[in-house]
Image (tube, rainbow, N blue to C red):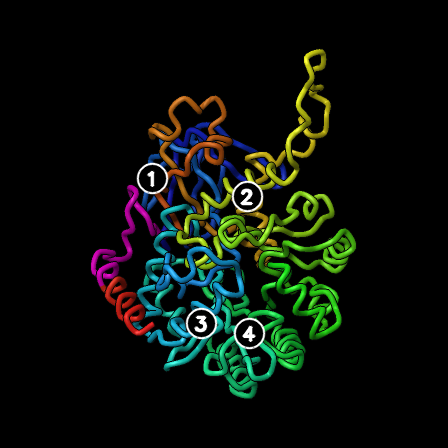
Amino acid sequence: MTTLLAKNADVLVTMDGQRRELRNAGLFARDGIIEQVGPTASLPATADRVLDLAGHILLPGLINCHHHLDQVLTRNIPAAQNTNLFPWLMAHYRIWARRTPEDTRTAVLIGCGELALSGCTTVFDHAYLFQNGCRVDDQIAAAAELGIRFVASRGSMSLGQSKGGLPPDDCVETEDAILRDCVRAIERYHDPTPGAMLQIVLAPCSPFSVTADLMREQAKMARHYGIRLHTHLCETLDEERYTLAHMGLRPVAYMESLDWVGEDVWYAHAVHVNDAEIGLFARKGAGVCHCPSSNMRLASGIAPVKAYRDAGVRVGLGVDGAASNDGSNLLGEARQAMLLARLRIGLPPPAGPDTALSTSDPLCAQEWMTAREALEIATVGGASVLGRSDLGSLEPGKCADFFTLALNAINYAGGLSDPVAAVVFCAPGRARHTVVGGRLIVDNGEIVTLDTEPVIRAHNRNTARLMESA
């Protein structure tokens, strides 16, 4: 057995049912599971590993509900810098199809390393293009090298251009091959037990890249094995026009016709929805992953996150692909989520010379997303979306997944009248410690499970090779 004691934190954010924030506090964990959370004086005096967190804030590990780690290979390519989703995808598909298993390894290590440095402890990766010998096993092996908690998708594309889809025909797979490999991945890798470090999700890419038959078969397979389903949905108006033209339905209605609206399903983006569709998600328990930076980068729109939460829809947070965000900083996404929700509501009308704004005006009080709400989406919200009752908060019986930030850092100077809010309002800080299952992944602001310098060099060589052949 191994034990971990984190003590003397200036503030500990539990995200428990009472949303307690404790002063001069810490936690004690055994074999990766929290046994005690409370004031430092109430905790055991010793452990196999002790973290003295004086001057730090301690928070639950952030949960990334949507990413494409392979896209770390194609950050910032000139052909896709100034386009929206469909032409952006066309600029990337064939480059992604040329990647090798070693390319995937360095991309996953770089992307997950970035995430860990931002306080992320659980990563969902939506991999859906498997050519050139690549398999979901590549992502899984690389994530294990780093030691991050991983939810891997055996995603898919089967609807090429010749059949009315968006991807080139040489970037899609046959549906028989997809279904066979999904069974293999589930039976080999999926761990349904509490505290699992690895789980599998089935994730057909989008309504414009897979057939209705594949969507139905994937739903049946997922429910047979008791695993979750994920896809992109309502990301852009182009997608809405596509489903109306090809299926005669709006995207949400199309999903409902395929038995793809339920408690075991969550969608990436879900930007372009109406009130009735939000109500449907709430009634049937479907979840949403908000990807604010990607939606801004591709001019996709602003997701109605406050409306989702008000309706009772489960909402998590994602950085999305590193080629539609160009970074993997989940703490930064929490800040963006808060700011973008505020932008969506607009500003109160300018006050005239003889008028003053009332502090009871809804735009002054009720509608603003708070910093704590943004942190909630990034922690317990993400755990709920992924169906993980063992993650998202710091409580006895939960996984010992957490991160710390040094409050004496320059970015928080002058902002510590409310240190919890400072984590979101101020410029994102680099995690001082990131702990996954009681194991330090980041220590003193550096990744300690991996020598990053040779990985970065190899990754840059891999990227250069792919771009030369583009």
Name the mark on residue 93: 3
The three-letter amino acid code for the residue at tag 2 is: Ala
- Disc with the residue nearer the chain's start (4 vs 3): 3
Residue 173 x %, y %: 50, 83
Which residue is at the front of the view, 184 or 29? 184
Taking 46 as reference, is 81 above or below it?
below
Which residue does the numbered mark 4 point to in the structure image? 166
Residue 220 x %, y %: 66, 78
Name the mark on residue 51: 1
The three-letter amino acid code for the residue at tag 1 is: Leu
Left or right: where 464 falls relative to 7: left
Query: Residue 406 is drawn in which quadrant?
Result: top left
- Give SS at disc 1: strand
Residue 229 in sight from this viewpoint: yes
Q: Residues within 10 Å of mark 4 (few under 14, many from 20)?
A: many
| Mark closer to the observer (3, 1) | 3
- Disc with the residue nearer the chain's start (4 vs 1): 1
Mark 3 touches mark 2? (CB < 8 Å):
no
Image quadrant where one finds the N terminus = bottom left
Residue 397 in sight from this viewpoint: no
The three-letter amino acid code for the residue at tag 3 is: Tyr
- Disc with the residue nearer the chain's start (3 vs 2): 3
- The residues tagged by marks 4 and 3 sit, at their Cα atoms, a distance apart of 10 Å
| Mark closer to the observer (1, 2) | 2
